[in-house]
Amino acid sequence: MKIALGADHGGLELKEMVKEYLIKGGYEVEDFGTHTKDSCDYPVYGQKVGESVSFGDCDRGIAICGTGLGISMAVNKVPGIRGALCTNEFMAAMSREHNNANVLVLGGRVLGVDLALRIVAVWLETEFLGERHQRRLDLITEIETKYLKS
């Protein structure tokens, strides 16, 4: 599985730890940055992660900023993306089982590393349940399609 990874300066340290975890776990990683602690704009990295998943270049994505809030808003502007800001393992499991989240969003300044890596592990290992949940995803896609501008 190929994972798109991106973060602003507030998520840089956690991104690097997640990247190491993913590589050790045998995942292929596309790191879209940032690569320095210099102040930068989270929408840039949210868009890169979102587009990579939406276009099919990566199977899933992980986006990180200081709280996860801003980059979550940015990544979810990309059509076809279901980014889930998760702060615990239960949310990570539900985001996959019920919502088929294709981007995990984390807050680098609000999560400890151990918890963040447990969230990543659960999110990667959990499968979408389909059935009644697919109907709800179809409704989300209808909303998205209604507001897309050509």
Image (cartoon, helix red, strand yellow):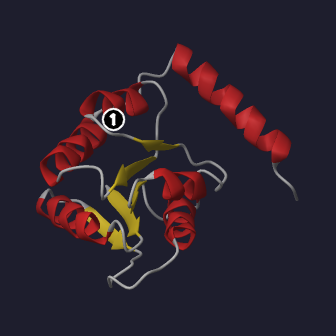
Q: Amino acid at mark 1?
A: Ala
Specify the quadrant that holds the N terminus. bottom left
Q: Which residue is mark 1?
A: 92
Q: How crowded is the residue under tag 1: few (<14 C-alpha within 10 Å), some, or many (20+)?
A: many
In the image, 124: left or right of 6?
left
Specify the quadrant that holds the C terminus. bottom right
In the image, 62: left or right of 14?
right
Residue 149 in view:
yes
- Is residue 70 placed above or below 114 in the rendered structure? below
Residue positioned 50% across, 68% down in the render:
42
Query: In the image as oriented, which residue stretches furthest toward the top?
Result: 132
In the image, 80: left or right of 59?
right
- Is residue 111 placed above or below 21 in the rendered structure? above
Expressed as whole percent of the image width and height from the top left, the position of residue 126 reads: 29, 33
- Is residue 118 placed above or below 67 in the rendered structure? above
- Is residue 69 placed above or below 45 in the rendered structure? above
Marker count (numbered): 1
Provide the secondary structure element on which disc 1 rests: helix
Q: Nearer the viewer, residue 73 or 146?
A: 73
Residue positioned 21% across, 43% down in the render:
121
Q: Nearer the viewer, residue 21 or 9?
A: 9
Residue positioned 58% across, 61% down in the render:
55
Expressed as whole percent of the image width and height from the top left, the position of residue 43 reads: 57, 67
Q: Find residue 132 and report its image quarter.
A: top right
